[in-house]
Structures are given as structure tokens and as C-alpha cells.
Amino acid sequence: MIIYFKNLWQAWLAILTSRSFLDALLGVDRFGNAFCAGHYKLTVSGRVGYFAYAKENLYWNILQWIINNTFHPLDGPNHCWNAFKWESSTDYRRGNDIALALLSVIVLIVCSILAPIIWFIACFKAR
């Protein structure tokens, strides 16, 4: 339990000490991962990419599909896999069932908000 709060605190400090807007967004992503019982230095996309690759089960593959399709205009078809390779960590934590349910809710909510925005902006950049 102590490590959970330590991860949340470290992720929160990363947001507060961000030097740019993109660093702050990365910090928010990492905070979301820490909130769902992941490590504070890793992103939700990297965690999902790792477990979709390592475990090959339906839960992780569905989350990967949702995230990949949300960020496709920015990163192409393999956003989660690229995030996993970019982080190059071995400290991925699955989390308990409550944390995984929370992770699913966060991914669904955030991606349902971001997907239309990202795809709308991508329509104008393609021209």
C-alpha cells in the first residue's frame, strides 16, 4: 500500500515540475498509470503494449486496439508497442482486478474524448 502512494506522489511531482506542456501531458499519463497500480515512470500505453504483447489475452488486446486507434493519426498503427519500446522498462505491474477495471474505465473515457479531437485535427493536417 505504501508503494502505491509513493508512486502516486512521484507521478504528481513529475506533473508539478514539468517544464513544458508536453512534459505535463506525459506526467498526466504516468499519473493515470500510477493511479491504476502501475509504476509512476511508465505510461498507460506502454503498460498496455507490454501486456498485450506478453500475455496475449483479450483484455489487453482490446485496450491496445482502443488506444492504438485513438492515436493512429499521431503515431501510426502501433502506438502502444512504440510506447513500450520507448520506455524500455522491466517494471510493468499488472495490478489487481480493481486496478484493471479502473484502467479500463480511464482508457475508455480518455480515448472517447481524445479520439474525435485527434482525428478532427488530423483531417486538417492531411490537406
Image (cartoon, rainbow, N blue to C red):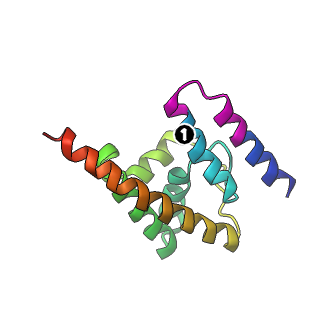
Q: Split into 4 quadrants, where in the image is the C terminus?
A: top left
Which of the 4 image quadrants contains residue 96? bottom right
Query: Left or right of 60: which side holds 27?
Result: right
Provide the secondary structure element on which disc 1 rests.
helix
Q: Is residue 100 visible?
A: yes
Which of the 4 image quadrants contains residue 65? bottom left
Q: Residue furthest top?
A: 19
Query: Left or right of 66: which side holds 24?
Result: right
Magenta stretch in the rendered image: 11-23
Q: Is residue 103 magenta?
A: no
What residue type is disc 1 on? Answer: Leu
Could you tell me what secondary structure mostly forms the magenta stretch?
Answer: helix
> Where residue 75 sits: x, y (%)?
34, 45
Task: Name the residue at 55% across, 68% down.
Answer: 104
Q: Residue furthest right?
A: 2
> Where residue 22 sits: x, y (%)?
49, 33
Q: Is residue 105 above or below residue 117?
A: below
Q: Which residue matches tag 1?
A: 26
Query: Left or right of 124: which side holds 34?
Result: right
> Where residue 37 sits: x, y (%)?
70, 58
Task: Name the residue at 44% across, 70% down.
Answer: 62
Count all numbered tags in the image, as a single digit: 1
Task: Name the residue at 27% across, 44% down.
Answer: 121
Q: Is residue 17 magenta?
A: yes
